[in-house]
Amino acid sequence: MTKTNTTGTTEAPDTMIKFDGVTKIYSDQTVAIEDISFEVERGTTTVFVGPSGCGKTTTMTLVNRMQDPTEGAVYYDGTDIQELDKVDLRRDIGYVIQEIGLFDHMTVGENIATVPELKGWDQSRIDDRVDELLELMDLEPGTYRDQYPNALSGGQQQRIGVARALAADPDVLLMDEPFGALDPLTREELQDEFLEIQERIDTTILFVTHDINEALKMGDKIAIFDVGELVQYGSPKEILHNPATEFVEDFIGADRTLKELQITPVRDIMSESVPTVEQPTASSVADTAEAATAALADGTGDQYVAPTNTVDIALSRMIETDTQSLPVVKDDDVVGTITESSIRAHQSNGGV
Amino acid sequence: MGLIDALLATYTYLVANFDEFLRLLAEHLALVLVSVALAIVIAIPMGVLATRNERAKSIVMSFGNVSQTVPTLAIIALVFPILGLGFLPALVGLFAYALLPILTNTVAGLENVDESTVEAARGMGMTENQILRQIQLPLAVPVIFAGIRTSAVLNVGTAYLAFFIGGGGLGVWVISGISLFNTPQLLAGAIPGALLAIGLDSLFGLIEGRLSGESMAEQSAAAG
């Protein structure tokens, strides 16, 4: 791959992608985006979100030169992409689109092998990589490798689409509404799977969606677009807590606080004091801990939460069981407590 | 004369003149296969060119359309003043006639390839040539082959007219059979032609299956 730091731009060393005053005007004079500048940190996931026609997809396609900017410059690992060869650049960048675009005349294995083939890997390395990716996507290689895409469900096809994009270990992955065409259940399943995969790979991801919930769930950073304009760029927390404009506020919706709870893990709020029966002062807490242990024992338990659960789930279970605190359970051990008042305190403190 | 009698007489005629029959059949087959083969070689690249460039497309398509609108007999007749009599002029006429179905189907086949498939291929770093060879053409094979089959079947019929400019073929028996009211001779020329058309159609169907991968057709059926 081309890793030259030729340009004299000064930027933080961990910047993978940088937009510098980028404007794109299509040949029919439509202004898709106007004077957009931002930086994407290496290894993070940035979600572009906004209504249809806001320029989010255009912005993404400027990165792999499916479009070229009218004004301004896009930097890839410090290099102006106009100086890079289009074809080489694209082979280093994974690309997932909503329509999936699998090659129907090739097997699943051949589809995944596309970019490694183009890069001229040797066959045994390609075969190993295909199997590795199928396993990563939870698809048994022996069953799926030689199937044709038409025989697969939509969810399976998009898993193959993601595997194909990751095949040559790209530094950057572009995902254009990757789960947009799937039914809600499959979509959530794929989002969760992808979040796990994301932990394991060190890829800079740009993700386009029109769904603010998906953006909050998937993104380390969120870029909110309004017609051709980048109106706010920040972490999900920042955006939920300090919407920059009325547009952002409307776009997030009236349930802003609930959305914050949806992205806050229990471990951020819980107190680590482990309630035990030997502490008679914390009797109410101890009761719930006992209840939780009982629930754990008979396997029915809704009366506790895991540290990785989000706070909205904790709150929902509190309402369900009409209690004000819940034990936090990890690997069958009670590791802490979360109370309704601690959630309220956390929110009024500005969610930090 | 009843139908059975006519068929029996045809059979007798065929057996009695079997050597001549084989010669005429070979000529007929040569006219069809060579003209279609030439049409494939010319029409597919022209079709590819047409999908790459709007202006080339209008020129190529109008050329193909014109060659198709001229009546069959007229094409044969038009070639005659230029190239004279014999096998070659007949071949040229048939070639012109075979172009359009292959050309239109090549264009349609390539244009029908899902835009998102091409976008995915381009986004992954395939060059335009790789997209054409590895993605568009393989996906267009069934449609292109439908065009080739149409041309082949059409030309089995059209090749009967080669007789008028001395091109040979089964038309020799059919046309003289009509002129001489010799029904057995007429049928001995006509029936094998019908069988030939069906045979060629199946043959190309078989090749198409091989080329586009039977497994894919099966998989599609299973998924549907």
Image: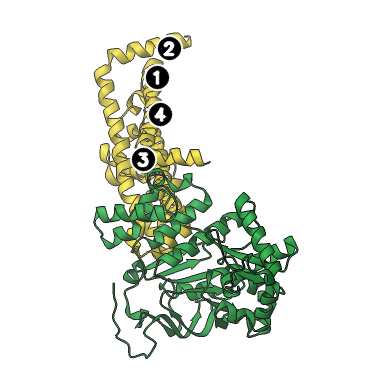
In the image, residue A235 lies at what x, y percent? 55, 79
Which element is circle 4 on? helix
Which amino acid does the dot numbered 1 rest on?
Leu
Q: Left or right of B61: which side holds B14? A: left
Q: Left or right of A85: which side holds A61? A: right
Q: CA distance from mark 1 to mark 2?
A: 8 Å
**Colour theme:** by chain
Q: CA distance from mark 2 to mark 3?
A: 31 Å
Q: Which residue shows up at 35% across the image and 13% down it?
A: B11
Q: Residues within 10 Å of mark 1 (few under 14, many from 20)?
A: many
Q: Which residue is mark 4?
A: B198
Do the residues bearing badges 4 and 2 touch, measured as CB atoms within 8 Å?
no
Q: Nearer the viewer, residue B45 or A45?
A: A45
Which of the two marks, 3 or 1, is nearer to us in this view? 1
The chain letter for the residue carrying disc 2 is B
Q: Which residue shows up at 60% across the image and 74% down it?
A: A271
Query: Is residue A123 among what the camera can see?
Result: yes
Which amino acid does the dot numbered 4 rest on?
Ile
In the image, residue A341 lies at what x, y percent? 70, 76
**Same-subunit check for callouts 4 and 2:** yes
Query: Is residue B73 among what the camera can see?
Result: no
Q: Earlier in the sequence, mark 1 or mark 4?
A: 1
Which amino acid does the dot numbered 3 rest on?
Ile
The chain letter for the residue carrying disc 1 is B
Q: Which residue is mark 1?
A: B187
Quarter where residue A308 is shown: bottom right
Please identify which colour was used for chain B in the image. Answer: yellow
> For residue B76, which numbered disc appears in the image?
3
> For residue B6, which numbered disc appears in the image?
2
